[in-house]
Image (cartoon, coloured by chain):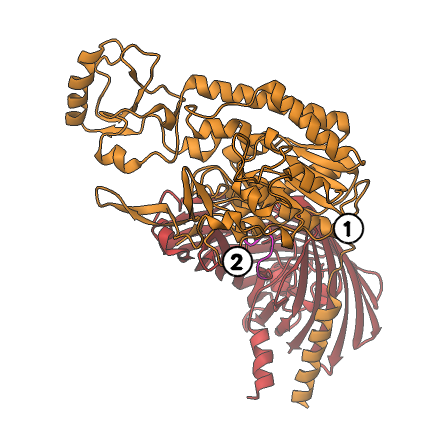
Chain colours: A orange, B red
Amino acid sequence: MKTKLLYTLLIAVTLLIGACKPKFDVPDPDKGSMDASRFVAIGSSMTAGFSDGALYYEGQQTSFVNILAEQMKAVGGGEFTTPYVSENSAGFALIPNNTTNVAAKFKLGYKTDCKNVSSLSPVRLSATENYNVFSTNIYSSGPFKNMGVPDAKSFHITYAGYGNSVATGGYYNPYFERMASNKVSASVLSDALDQNPTFFSLCIGINDALSYALAGGAADSLTTQARFDANIDNIVNQLTANGAKGVIGNIPDVTKFPFFTTIPYNNLTLDQTQANSLNTVYTPIDSTVFPNVFKAGANNFVIYDSQFSIGIRPMYEGELIVLTTPLDSVKCNSLGSLNPFHNKDILTLNEIQSIRTAIAGYNAKLQAVAQAKGLAYVDMNAFFNTVNTGVVYNGVSVNAQFVKGGAFSLDGLNLNPIGNALLANEFIKAINKTYNSTILQVDAIKYRGTIFP
Amino acid sequence: MSYKKLTWLCLCIMPMLSWAQGFQVNLQGQKQQGMGGAGTACMQDASSLFFNPGGASFVQGTSINLGVTPTIARGLFLDDNTHQLYKTKDPVGTPFAAYGLFSLKDSNNLKVGLAVYTPFGSTVDWEDKWAGRFALTHLQLQAIFIQPTLSYQISPKWGVGAGFIYSYGKVNLQKDIPLIDATGNYGHAELSGKANGFGYNVGIYYKPTEKLSIGLTYRSKVNMSVKAGQATFNVPSAVKDNFPDGKFKATLPLPNVGTLGFAYKANSKLDFALDINYVGWKAYDTLSFDYENNTPTLVDTKSARKYKNTFAFRGGAQYKVTPHFAARLGLAYGLSPVQNGYVTPETPDANRINYTAGLGYEFGKHLRVDVSFLFTHLNRKDTNLETNLSGTYKTNVCAPGIAVSYNF
């Protein structure tokens, strides 16, 4: 009897649990006035999913356009073909002036410096490919909806033969050589247009400023405004000729990327003895430029500057040092003190100003074109600015601080998956606003930040 | 003892639950529960020790009352931006109440009582990898109030009473930490500890006519303080130094409650009851955790909760179908103490209407069994200012309860 009663109670409770369930009526996503069936993404490293200093499978999967394409499937989006790197690959990237080997991706590991101090630091994995990976064309698994080509500039997009390693004098991009329909005759745009896109994303122009910045302003050059404008007009006119809709992203202020902000201009740490000995070297050279400037504690690094008659000066506040600067040489070989930094390692105030002016000009053009063509427009610069100050998403804080901040990958230039997911949400918001669609955002916390050992 | 019995017993002895206003649980008497939770002026049995210590002396004879309310609270969260739907797990809690009220031999007017009940509690366990995992994955909050009480009948019209409250409880709070290791596992934090606190419960009972009675009670705030909780962090080894395990301190205020109640006996069969609660939720302004081992990463936290004081209105009726059989119906309206921008996955609270019903039957002279049922639906849309978690919480609460009283 008692057992029976207990049974009855347990069954009653179980039934009640079932009956007590709340319900939600959730409307299906709607495509509004856009057509997602053939979505092609045109851009450079960020569109390609370049991350952690290399092109690799997970990075490609979690590029902001791949995330966007996944969300667009619910409103009729098709397969978003991507020139994937092998899943087991350690990734690859070009090494300057090297046509034999490639660089694999970074992961966070422990590195022992010249003073035998071990600390967490990005470490490159051993490469699983060599340079042949570029000449091994994979178009047979295309055509590719993800037409992101690392390092591409605005005027490269329409360049026929951008994948041609043999031609001299023109532009050649090994990443495009790998994915082009025809190395000799295809351009990024022609391969995109061949797929008759109904919707496109265009995020081009960052390298028009970044390549110059990465070279410390010592090589490469900023694309002129006139050239940029003409190329953007050309690209967008062709993309929209058949009535395709699309979204344009503008260009973030690259000088705020962790690649440039991680090593402070005054990170030369000295004790009194070291300061005294530097003063005895530098003050006699020019007591106006170096009036006993060195002291115990934090000091401004010393750089070469041809504008000064003595060819050297202390760095100014606001000037930037590239992340690739060999810190071992700073610690143990007096780089940045007795051996001044070279211009290629530094963005001076003038260089920073010209980069920012160029980007502002590019962005004005991009916004005007988006407006004139009725395209969705994403202020990526504003997005990156919010990342710089810190974003809290579903209880997770991410910011632009190198490694710890979580938003940027270990190259300090491209985003981590969580950063890409947040960026993809900005694109979704802009598309929904322009085309009255209701594409759902992604839960950005399902995408990772920095991986710690 | 059979396995099934054991299972049932396990359910019974876990005093916890639910989403009643904030984390207040208002399930302390089956008769009152059937009448919307009103009972401050309506002296039913030994459960008056909770509802109005001043009126307990008006309860005839010695009374023992044991009750339990298995409470099923099922929660859903719909993320506004992604339309992803997440649910809570393990939704059964069992608030209980046990009362004993005794006459002293040398006095007809003075009664002593002991009440053991669970007026506050919350258990919420969100599904794995849900959108708010970095805000909260699991919260268990239990508080048992033990209240020895004296109740004195001054005159046939007036009664006063006071009880001392010792509160004992446990808290266990868990959330994920957004630091991922190479195998794809996120970090996890668990804060757990024992808490205790003190308070009191006083009341006045006034019965101006045979038909009307009035009650006024005040249950004080009880600060549940965790003095030596244990904080455990499971994070990737490279950052473990930033998250040292160790002790923590925290305090959770259980608010004061003032109640004005009326009861009206329309005739020998029909009773009405009405309670107005004023709950001092403003006490829950901040949830702070003070860690013994601080690092630049692990700093003491102060999360704004900014609860506000609220009212609740509870009313109900009892109809005696036969002299031994009573049917009850009630309604309660509670205002949420949680302001917009401060809704958290711990207590996804909202204004609510409680629908209640109950039955009671007397087996002979001494024994009585009462059952009740409560249903509440909560619906709250919010974007939390601290976490930016944005979405709609829906919760259904179904609480069937049963109590046995013995009077002699």
Residue A277, image x, y percentages = 15, 22
Residue B316, image x, y percentages = 78, 60
Tell me if I can see residue A252 in this picture.
Answer: no
Residue stretch in magenta? B128-135
Horizontal side of A124 relative to B386 (left or right) equals left
Asked whether B166 or B320 is in front, the reply is B166
Which residue is painted at 62% across and 30% down in the image?
A: A250
The numbered dot on residue A76 is 1
Asked whether B59 or B393 is in front, the reply is B393
Horizontal side of A346 relative to B377 (left or right) equals left
Q: For mark 1, give the secondary structure.
A: loop
Which residue is painted at 37% across and 42% down in the image?
A: B296
Identify residue for label 2. A87
- Placement of A172 over or under B121, stated as above or below: above
Amino acid marked by disc 1: Gly
Q: Residues within 10 Å of mark 1 (few under 14, many from 20)?
A: some
Q: For mark 2, give the secondary structure.
A: loop
Q: To which quarter of the image does residue B96 belong?
A: bottom right
The numbered dot on residue A447 is none
Horizontal side of B163 relative to B357 (left or right) equals left
Chain letter for mark 2: A
Residue A24, image x, y percentages = 76, 56
